């Protein structure tokens, strides 16, 4: 019987490296490097050490897969768990607009961990990642805005995206892809409720999505069966977790459209819902030569999901929570001209000028912005100055969007900052990792990226 | 701030052994033995060996916790995973009526695995299990019938029940219980869609609920924070996964009512939704001295959830799926007088008389039965005989319900059959495990139950 899940599964089974346009391969290398930077930047950030300790307590003492933040070797399950937690915490990982999915932070941890165990090539890793992005984005779009209103799509749909990517590494046929979607979809979880408290669940969601997806794939390889229509069946994900699904998203233009190349890099180190307004405010202040002291009030005119996700954060008490405060983000932009990792670390909670600016920011639902969302993330701000003037500014492609993407130089610069942020990698290692990523398609075999160098260093040390 | 989750958390934090009525302690020992039997009976049953292999591939090669089906020592995470998968597969594990939760198969695997690692006493294990049952049942009732219509409550709520039990072993205070509910609730997953295909997800759900709950508890001990109101918050479980929640269930009569003692033992080896009709048919046939050959048609008059869960199973193709076929269950009862493990194994798919009887069974929604559900699971059947007579039969307390429970002799007998079913334990071991369970409250320290004996035997073998 043919149905959307099976059509998607057949596409995933048939996908091969030669079918990928050059620009998709190239973008995949960029996204891989960008993800690696986010994972390294998560080193020592709360709550990442808790996941490292869990991996040590529950997992093996060695293995083929690498936990990037503590440079330990372990099994794929725990490498995926730790690296996925780590790569989402500084809020610099990529986002796909119309699905509102962060694909990189769930797809790459699972894919890299499995590739290291399986000894896959760089090209196999690329095809697997493309498959994971494609499935994840389409399922996120399928589940629609009503899903995202309560569920953290990167947690729920991320489980399926990770499962598909690992399934591709394992060489699944159409039937196995149907099964793995079933087994991943029935594990899909992640609720937004934690936002109100600034709790650690966002990292738990990505960690679990990557590890659960990997578990689904490895069990499917051994013969575990899953629901045939987990997406659109009577008691499947659509039935239980959405009110506005559209099955067309699952299958339209398969092989013509590539979800991976539609993915945005994050420029600011904050929740993506703040970026359009941040870019618009920056443009407005530059256009009218305003200082933060000139500004009486900013109204960020936003889509509903921004209100759903950012609205609960009224008084951020942690750096991570501040990344979900529209006022803090616009405050950093207004006062310091940027909202990067360092600004958050040093200014978000303690800078009096930022804190007072925060109180002068409000959000308002804008019908035009809301209608365009999630396809487009439009930036619209209105400013009233202390001397009574009013200005407004519109930007249509936030920095990092496919229409306004980051160059390889900008990506290298971002990566170096991420790698250095918590001492995740030395400048020399960062250079080597950049070289590795830009040659990803030529790597004969994916090996541990830092551990191997560690060992070499240790061995040298022992020799000396 | 006080709210239902916090009230429940405070109760869980304060709970101690001396507060438990004797009948609750005693029932907990019985449920523990009953669960152990179900776990042993899962040995070698598909898909349990897949979970064993995953634990070997991803976990450590030793540890303090025991995987019961393959008698390996591992970390608590993987022992919980394997034992929870195993204890749900033969459909003999306990069920709580009004929450429609199978508490044992999620609470005991996580509790036993953690207790073995922590060196907890029998009394600590009992208090932990009572806490897990109490929280799980109340949250299941809170989420209501609309949740169960799409979600497999034992998978979703099971995650919270397991987390609470392990949290109790770890000595959580009120705040930590709030956090662990948040971190467990945001991982809650499990959809019924697999029923239509007879896929393996039911075992995946229990496996993951136990392991995920344990993960939530261990991470919470280390400092992971969770949403404060995961149950009734604006973007919590009620908002995303139910339309008929009732917060009263979370807190009414805490410390007076004990959910654990309301739990039913399973007599028939099938889905609990078939049991009331099975008991009613048996009573009817005995009352009127009918043979299966006399019966033209049986109408099982049932609650809606029975139709939701059993309805998709029209042509069972595996023994496990046959346990969800009302026709097969009533066929076994009519032809063989019982629907136990052996009847399913040898008769459910191959016995022509059972198969033809199955076609003469239909289900019909009964308003009285539906109104009583899930508080009471009423059995109502109507029979038309070949010679044109009609009979009907009602039973109000299916065999195994608290109002019609199994005696310790019956439980021992059931346990011996479960232990022997797949060679999970020898008769001598079964005797020892029965003794262990009946003295659970006196155990100074929970150790591996089979492995220790294995080692002793191996050591003796080596000596000989």
Image (cartoon, coloured by chain):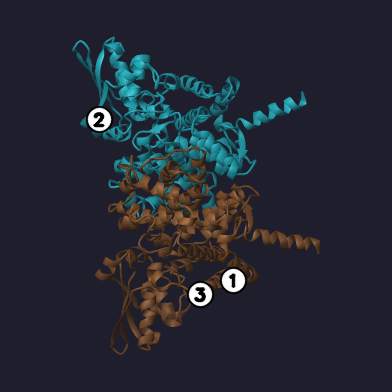
Chain colours: A cyan, B brown
The residue tagged with tag 2: helix, strand or loop? helix
- Residue B426 is left or right of residue A133, and the answer is right
* Distance CA(mark 1)–CA(mark 2): 65 Å
Q: Are marks 2 and 3 on the same chain?
A: no
- Residue B360 is left or right of residue A427, and the answer is left
| Residue B43, quarter of picture | bottom right
- Residue A152 is left or right of residue A171, and the answer is left
Q: Is residue B167 visible?
A: yes
- Which residue, given by chain and number where applicable, does mark 2 sit on? A369
- Which residue, given by chain and number where applicable, does mark 1 sit on? B420
Q: Are marks 1 and 2 in contact (CB under 8 Å)?
A: no
Image location of residue A279, percent across then percent down: 33, 21
Image location of residue B51, percent across then percent down: 55, 55
The residue tagged with tag 1: helix, strand or loop? helix
The residue tagged with tag 3: helix, strand or loop? helix
Residue furthest out toward the right:
B464
At x 49%, y 55%, the residue is B17
Q: How many marks?
A: 3
Image location of residue A212, percent across then percent down: 49, 46
Disc 2 chain ID: A
- Which residue, given by chain and number where applicable, does mark 3 sit on? B410
Quick one: B69 or B298, which is closer to the camera? B69
Image location of residue B10, percent across then percent down: 40, 46
* Distance CA(mark 2)–CA(mark 3): 67 Å
Disc 3 chain ID: B
Q: Are marks 1 and 3 on the same chain?
A: yes
Quick one: A300 or A292, which is closer to the camera? A292
Quick one: A62 or B16, which is closer to the camera? B16
In the image, which is nearer the foreground, mark 2 or mark 3? 3
């Amino acid at each position: 019987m043919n149905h959307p899940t099976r059509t998607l599964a057949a596409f995933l089974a048939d996908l091969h490296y030669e079918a990928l346009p050059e620009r998709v391969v190239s973008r995949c290398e960029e996204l891989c490097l960008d993800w690696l930077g986010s994972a390294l930047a998560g080193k020592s950030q709360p709550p990442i050490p808790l996941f490292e300790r869990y991996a040590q307590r529950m997992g093996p003492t060695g293995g083929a897969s690498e936990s990037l933040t503590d440079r330990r070797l372990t099994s794929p399950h725990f490498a995926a768990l730790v690296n996925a937690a780590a790569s989402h915490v500084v809020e610099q990982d990529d986002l796909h607009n119309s699905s509102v999915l962060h694909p990189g932070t769930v797809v790459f941890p699972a894919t890299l961990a499995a590739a290291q165990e399986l000894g896959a090539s760089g090209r196999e890793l690329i095809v697997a990642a493309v498959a994971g992005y494609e499935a994840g984005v389409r399922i996120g779009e399928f589940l629609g805005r009503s899903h995202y209103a309560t569920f953290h799509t990167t947690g729920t749909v991320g489980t399926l995206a990770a499962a598909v990517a690992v399934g591709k590494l394992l060489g699944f046929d159409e039937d196995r892809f149907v099964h793995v979607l079933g087994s991943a979809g029935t594990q899909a979880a992640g609720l937004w409720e934690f936002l109100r408290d600034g709790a650690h669940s966002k990292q738990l969601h990505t960690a679990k999505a990557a590890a659960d997806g990997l578990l689904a794939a490895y069990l499917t390889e051994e013969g575990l069966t899953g629901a045939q229509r987990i997406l659109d069946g009577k008691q499947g994900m659509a039935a239980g977790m959405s009110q506005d699904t559209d099955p067309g998203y699952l299958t339209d233009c398969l092989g013509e459209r590539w979800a991976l190349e539609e993915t945005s890099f994050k420029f600011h180190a904050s929740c993506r819902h703040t970026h359009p307004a941040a870019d618009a405010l920056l443009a407005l202040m530059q256009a009218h030569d305003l200082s933060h002291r000139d500004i009486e009030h900013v109204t960020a005119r936003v889509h509903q999901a921004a209100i759903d996700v950012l609205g609960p954060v009224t008084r951020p008490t942690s750096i991570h929570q501040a990344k979900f405060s529209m006022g803090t983000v616009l405050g950093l932009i207004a006062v310091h001209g940027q909202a990067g990792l360092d600004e958050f670390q040093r200014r978000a909670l303690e800078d009096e000028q930022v804190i007072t600016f925060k109180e002068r920011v409000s959000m308002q639902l804008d019908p035009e912005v809301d209608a365009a969302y999630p396809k487009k993330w439009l930036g619209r701000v209105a400013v009233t100055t202390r001397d009574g003037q009013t200005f407004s500014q519109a930007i249509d492609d936030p920095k990092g969007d496919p229409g306004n993407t980051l160059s390889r130089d900008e990506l290298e610069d971002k990566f170096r900052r991420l790698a250095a942020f918590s001492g995740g990698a030395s400048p020399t290692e960062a250079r080597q990792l950049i070289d590795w990523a830009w040659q990803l398609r030529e790597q004969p075999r994916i090996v541990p990226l830092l551990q191997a160098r560690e060992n070499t260093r240790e061995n040298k040390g022992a020799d000396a």
